[in-house]
Image (spheres, grey):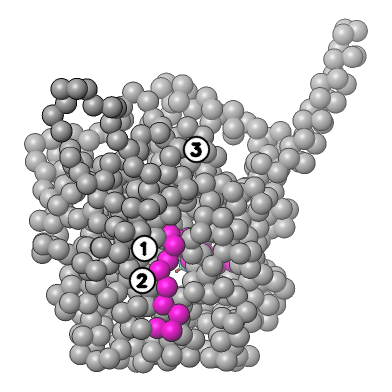
Amino acid sequence: MRWARHAVPAAVTALAALAARDLLQREHALRRNFPLLGRARYLLESLGPELRQYIVAGNNEERPFTRDQRRWVYASAKRQNNYFGFGTDNDIEYTPGYPIIKHRTFGRAVPASTPTIGHEVRLPSAKVLGAARRRAHAFRPESVVTISGMSFGSLSGPAVEALNRGAAIAGCLHNTGEGGLSPYHRHGGELILQLGTAYFGCRDDRGRFDLARLKDVVAGAPVRALEIKLSQGAKPSLGGLLPAAKVSAEIAATRGIPTGRDCVSPSRHAEFSDCDSLLDWVELLAAETGLPVGIKSAVGDLDFWTELADLMRDTDRGVDFVTVDGGEGGTGAAPLIFTDSVSLPFQQGFARIYPIFAERDLHEQVVFIGSGKLGLPDNAVVAFALGCDMVAVGREAMLAIGCIQAQKCHTDTCPTGVATQNAWLARGLDPASKAVRAAHYIKTLRRDLTKVAEACGVEHPGLIDTDAVEILGGRTSATPLREVYGYRPGWGLPSAADRQAVVKLMSTEAPQGGSAPPSPTAQR
Ligand SMILES: Cc1cc2nc3c(=O)[nH]c(=O)nc-3n(C[C@H](O)[C@H](O)[C@H](O)COP(=O)(O)O)c2cc1C
Ligand code: SF4
C-alpha cells in the first residue's frame, strides 16, 4: 500500500485547504460556519431537481415557502436567471382559491421585454405618507417594497446590518422591529421606528415610555415614520421574552434594559387602553416628532377596527398608515397554536378591514401596508388589488441574505447566522455581500410588480384593481376578486389625484416595451 502513504496525506492537505477556503470566503455563510460540511447542502441543492424526481417532496410541497418560491428569491438575490422552464408545475386547474391575474391585450402601458430591464426602476408609493393629516415630515416613500420589522435580538447584528445596507442600496424603508434602534440599523437605510409594548430604546429606567428619549432617537437617525405595534400575525395578543442568556451588552444598550436578566415584552401597551386613547397618543407622537405615525396589527375581531374608523371619521385624529399582518406571517418564536390558528390570513383579514375604512371615506387618506408572504409577486399583486399601497417583506428578505428555512430561529442555533446571537454563527454572515443580495431581491420584486402592472395595462401595481384578478374555484369556475370580497367599484385604488400623480411619476421611470417596426400594410 505504498500509494496510500502518499494519497492519504495529500487528501488531508486538500481537505484542510478546502476547509480554510470555506472559512475565509464571505459569500456563503453556511460554508463559513460549517467548513466542508456546508458544501454538502449546496451540492444537494444543485442536484435537487433530479433527486426529487425519485425520492423527495415536490417543488410546491414545503412550507412556509415552497422550493420554487425559495429558488425564485435566491436566484433574484444573486441576480441569476430566475425564470422557470417548461411551464407551471402548480396545480392551477384543481386548486380552489388560486388567484389569476388578467392581462389586457391593448393596455395603456406596455411591458419591456428584456428580463433585466426595469431592475433600476423606482417604484414609489402612490400615496404620500402623512399628507392627508398634514404631518410636518410627510413624504412619498421611494419604494412600495419595505423591509418588515424584525428586531435586533431575534436577528443577529450582521443580519440587521445587511438588511439596512440593502435598504440603502435599494432605496427602501427598513422597519426596526420592536427591539429598538441598534447600531446595526445605522448603515444608511431609512427607517420606520417600531414602538412595541416594552418601548425598547425609548423607555426610562423603570420601563416607562419616555418621550424625550424617543425624540433623541429620532433626531439621531434617519427615522421617517413611527409604527405602533399592536400585534403581529404569528402571535397576536402575546408579549415576548428574550431569555437572560441572550441579553448581551449590545442588546441591553439598544433596548435600554439591564444585562443578565430575562427581557420581557408585556402583552399590552401602557400608554393607551382603547381606540380613543390610542388616537390621542398617535397625535401626540406626530405633533412631537413631525413624523407620520401608523399602527401594525393582525386581524381578528373587527370591533377594534370599526371603533377606530368611527373615531377617525368623527374626530380630528387619525393614523397615517395601517400595516396589516397576516396570520401566516413569521416570528422569531411563538407557541404553535398562535402561529397556526390565531388571527386571519392576510387576504381575508385585509379584505375585512379595508371596507371599514372605505365605507367611511377614509381609504384614500390612509396608506395601507400589507405583510404575510407578500414578498412573492403573485401574493403582492393580490394585495395591491385589494387596496395595499405598499408591502413589507420579512422572511423573504431573510432568505435573500442566506436563510435556508431550517426553522430553528427560536433555538439560537441558526446555521446561517441570520437569526442567532451566537457570535461564531453570526460571524459567518458577511453584511456587505448580503446587503447586495437583499437589494437585488427587492429590486427584482419591484421589477416583477411593474411588469405585471404593465401586463394589466397600468403603470403601477397600485393601479391594479379588483377586477383584474379572479379567484379560481377549481377547474370550471372563477370569481372576480371584487365579488369574492364584496368590494364596491373604485375600492382598492388611490384617489384620482394620487393616480394621476403616480402615472406621471412612472411615465418618466419605467422603460416601455413596444413592437417590431410595422409593415407597410399594418392597420394602426
Ligand atoms: C425573526 C422574525 C422576527 C420578527 N420580529 C418582529 C418584530 O419585532 N415586530 C413585528 O412587528 N413583527 C416581527 N416579525 C414579523 C414580520 O415583521 C412580518 O410581519 C411577518 O413575518 C410577515 O411577513 P413575511 O411573511 O414576509 O415574513 C418578525 C418575523 C420574524 C421572522
Ligand atoms: S434558523 Fe433557519 S429559518 Fe431561522 S433564520 Fe436561520 S436558516 Fe432561516
Tell me the residue that label 3 is attached to: 75
In the orientation shown, which residue stands out farthest toward the front? 520
Q: Which residues are magenta?
A: 135-152
Q: Quadrant of the C terminus?
A: top left
Q: Quadrant of residue 455?
A: top left
Camera-near label (2 vs 3) is 2
- Residue type, numbered disc 1: Ser
Disc 1 on helix, strand or loop?
loop
- Which mark, by number, is residue 125? 1
Left or right, 178 with respect to 378, comes to right
Residue at the spot x=43%, y=59% of the render? 143
Mark with earlier residue (3, 1): 3
Identify whether 177 is placed above or below 170.
below
Left or right, 428 with respect to 85, comes to right
Evaluate if marks 3 and 1 touch, with contact meaning CB atoms under 8 Å apart: no
**Residue 167's spot in the image, x, y percent?**
54, 59
Mark with earlier residue (2, 3): 3
Left or right, 442 with respect to 301, comes to right
Within 8 Å of ligand 2, the CB of disc 3? no
Camera-near label (3 vs 1) is 1
